[in-house]
Structures are given as structure tokens and as C-alpha cells.
Image (cartoon, rainbow, N blue to C red):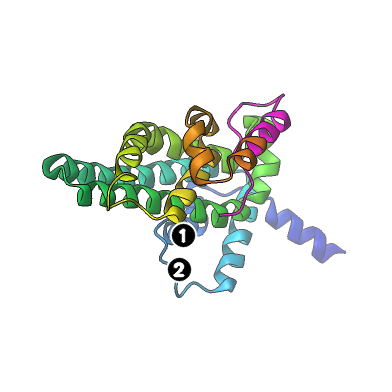
């Protein structure tokens, strides 16, 4: 009994700033970067468990706000890195004006969004305790919603109109993306910005099961009627 009490006392002893950086954020940061960059080929399940425990311990030691801010800053930095890739690809497309370049830009946008969505699906469960202790009750949101909102703000709002214009052009050429690629993009878009799916109703009806997409959007709106209207769909990608 005394051993258990001593463990709890130790668990809730607050980190110093230097301890937070060295024992918590530095290893957590390295793990998150691997997920964001999709470089997890040699990542071990034990490392995932270790990171979950590090995050849990950090929340217990009084650094929940700092941890949440550092997470958002890291992801924001990553989003701007992706935006630079898209900016470069878009400039090449503008200079070249070929259907090939347009298709490459379209595929890059789709692939980056897909990779980001997969990374978020891996990262969010690591922060489950932070989500229920701090983000949901204090921020009135969730970590998933906040991270999707970052991508929407930095990238989607910058390029989405161009993407829809390109798609409408490419579908009438020999460089049209595959139906599977179009379907993937539209489902990802409906997750991150459902209002855009509604605006592009005809496109969604043509390339994916539009009725399913719009019924999911309506269901999400009902679920979030007392919350901020930025819920992401829970459909697996």
C-alpha cells in the first residue's frame, strides 16, 4: 500500500522546465516527427507504448497546457513545410501550364492530405489522456479537431479552390486522375472541410457515394450542435 502511494506521489511531482524538455518533450517530439513524416518503417510497438506513457506522465506532472501548445506548434511547422512543397509544385505548374504538371500537383495535394490524415489517426490516440483531461473540457474541442483545423487553415484554404478547378479541367483530358484517387480526395475533403463538400455537391455525386457523404455530414452537425462546428468525420481512411 505504501509503495503504491509513493508511486503516485512521485508521478504527480511537477517537472521543472528542463526536466520537461529533456525527459518529456524531446523524446515525444522525435516520435511525432516520425509519424508526421511517415518514416516509421523501423518503429517498434514498444516505442509507441513508451510515448503514450511519457505523455500520460507529462500531463500528471502539470504540463498539459505546455504539451498541447508544443504539439500544435510542431504540427503547424510541419503543415508549413508541406505548404512549401505545394507552393513549389504550383509554381512549376504555372510556369509549365501542361496537363502533366497539373496532374502532378493534384496528386501531390491528395497524397500529402492522405499522409497527414493517417499520421493524425496514429498521433491522436497517444494523447487520449490529455484530450479527456484538458482539451475537451477546457478548450471545448478535441485534439483531432484541432490538428485537422491546422491543416485546413494552413493548406486546404490556400489550395482547395485551385484543386477543384484543376479537377474539373483534368477529368476531360487524358491526364485525368483515377476514379480511386478522386474518390479518396473527395472523402478526405469531406472530413476536413464538410462545407466544401456541400458546395461541390455535383462533383461528389459524380465520383463518390454522395448520399453517404452528405448524410455523414448531417450526422456530424447533429452531434456537434452544442459545440464548435468543426467536427471531423470518424470514417477510417
Q: Is the magenta stretch mostly helix, strand or loop?
A: loop
Q: Nearer the viewer, residue 123 or 73?
A: 123
Q: Residue 147 carries which label?
A: none
Tell whether position 32 is magenta: no
**Separation of residues labelled 1 and 2 (CA atoms):** 6 Å
Identify the residue under disc 1. 35
* Quadrant assignment for the N terminus: bottom right
Tell whether position 221 is magenta: yes
Task: Report if residue 115 is visible in the image.
Answer: no
- Stretch in magenta: 216-237
Q: Residue at x 42, y 41 (%)?
A: 73
Q: Eyeballing the image, is 55 above or below 4?
A: above
Bin the neighbour count of mark 1 within 10 Å (Cα to Cα): few under 14, some 14-19, many 20 and up. Answer: some
Identify the residue under disc 2. 40
Quarter of the image where one finds residue 139: top right
Marks 1 and 2: CB-CB under 8 Å? yes
Q: For mark 1, give the secondary structure.
A: helix
* Quadrant assignment for the C terminus: bottom right
Task: Report if residue 199 is visible in the image.
Answer: yes
Amino acid at each position: 500500500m505504501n509503495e503504491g502511494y509513493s508511486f503516485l506521489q512521485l508521478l504527480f511531482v511537477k517537472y521543472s522546465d528542463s526536466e520537461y524538455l529533456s525527459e518529456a518533450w524531446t523524446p515525444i517530439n522525435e516520435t511525432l516527427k516520425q509519424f508526421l513524416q511517415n518514416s516509421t518503417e523501423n518503429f517498434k510497438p514498444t516505442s509507441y507504448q513508451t510515448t503514450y506513457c511519457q505523455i500520460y506522465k507529462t500531463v500528471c506532472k502539470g504540463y498539459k497546457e505546455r504539451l498541447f501548445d508544443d504539439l500544435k506548434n510542431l504540427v503547424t511547422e510541419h503543415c508549413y513545410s508541406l505548404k512549401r512543397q505545394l507552393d513549389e509544385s504550383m509554381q512549376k505548374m504555372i510556369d509549365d501550364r501542361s496537363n502533366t504538371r497539373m496532374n502532378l500537383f493534384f496528386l501531390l495535394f491528395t497524397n500529402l492530405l492522405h499522409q497527414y490524415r493517417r499520421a493524425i489517426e496514429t498521433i491522436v490516440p497517444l494523447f487520449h489522456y490529455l484530450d479527456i483531461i484538458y482539451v475537451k473540457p477546457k478548450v471545448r474541442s478535441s485534439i483531432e479537431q484541432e490538428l485537422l483545423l491546422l491543416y485546413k487553415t494552413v493548406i486546404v484554404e490556400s489550395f482547395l479552390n485551385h484543386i477543384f478547378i484543376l479537377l474539373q479541367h483534368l477529368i476531360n483530358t487524358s491526364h485525368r486522375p483515377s476514379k480511386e484517387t478522386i474518390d479518396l480526395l473527395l472523402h478526405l475533403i469531406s472530413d476536413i472541410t464538410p462545407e466544401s463538400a456541400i458546395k461541390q455537391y455535383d462533383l461528389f455525386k459524380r465520383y463518390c457515394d454522395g448520399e453517404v457523404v452528405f448524410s455523414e455530414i448531417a450526422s456530424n452537425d447533429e452531434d456537434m450542435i452544442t459545440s464548435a462546428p468543426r467536427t471531423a468525420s470518424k470514417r477510417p481512411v
